[in-house]
Image (cartoon, rainbow, N blue to C red):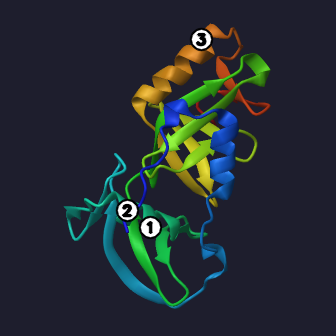
Amino acid sequence: MPTPPPPDFASLSLAEIARLAAEHRLPPVESWNPEHCGPSDMRIARDGTWFHQGSPIGRAAMVKLFSTILRREPDGSFVLVTPVEKLDIEVEDAPFQAVELKVEGEGERMRLAFRLNTDDLVTAGPEHQLRFEEGPRPYLHVRRGLEALVARSVYYELAQIALSNGSEPPGVWSNGAFFALEPQA
């Protein structure tokens, strides 16, 4: 049976986005500790494209499935993990990309929601921090040490908000947290 298409992000309210994000159940990968089985022959490119044995994975449903069993290890490496196996996966930058932004409210009451390339929905705030590195390279914390690189077009939207709201240093608010667009030390 085909997977239904994700809802239209632009038509959702932030309350609906928060509800959908809360309903999204993920496997308890942090509690699975199988023996390491070797490489997966998979790679996530800087642009968020997933590859297997050098070829792009063309089925979005497969990428979404694999993304649910992705885990970051304490040493910073990435693995795909199930209750019975753990396989290395190469990640060139961040495993996800934030490809779309939805904004509600103004100033300190602003909320920023992001749609990822896997159709996951994340609202920035104290538990889902935005950070900015030189480049500029903005990142959004997704879950358990996994981050999304914010797409350039989305970064430009954030920069426009930051420059128009008069904050010093320039930055954005979301869910009561302030995120300066300055690179972190």
Task: Give the class, few, some or many, for how many residues have Cα within 10 Å of label 3's Cα (few <14, many ≥20).
Answer: some
* Tag 2: amino acid: Ala
Q: Position of residue 174 (x, y in %)?
A: 71, 31
- Measured in 3D between alpha carbons, the distance from the residue under mark 1 to the one under mark 2, in whole angstroms, is 6 Å
Residue projecting furthest to the front: 1
The quarter in which the N terminus is drawn is: bottom left
Residue 92 picture quarter: bottom left
Would you say residue 11 is visible in this rendering?
yes
- Specify whether residue 128 is in view: no
Residue 34, position as x, y percentages in the image:
55, 89
Circles 2, 3 touching at the beta carbon (< 8 Å) = no
Mark 2 vs mark 3, foreground winner is 2
Question: Is residue 71 or residue 104 the one in the foreground?
Answer: 104
Left or right side of 178 for 50: left
Left or right placement of residue 144 versus residue 178 in this view: left
Q: Secondary structure at mark 3?
A: helix
Q: Are marks 1 and 2 in contact (CB under 8 Å)?
A: yes
Decide: few, some or many residues near mark 1? Use Cα within 10 Å; few <14, some 14-19, many ≥20. few
- Residue at 59%, 51% (x, y): give it: 142
Instruction: Describe residue 75's horizontal placement relative to residue 151 as left or right.
Output: right
Residue sticking out furthest to the left: 55
The residue that mark 1 highlights is: 65
Q: Is residue 61 above or below residue 181?
A: below
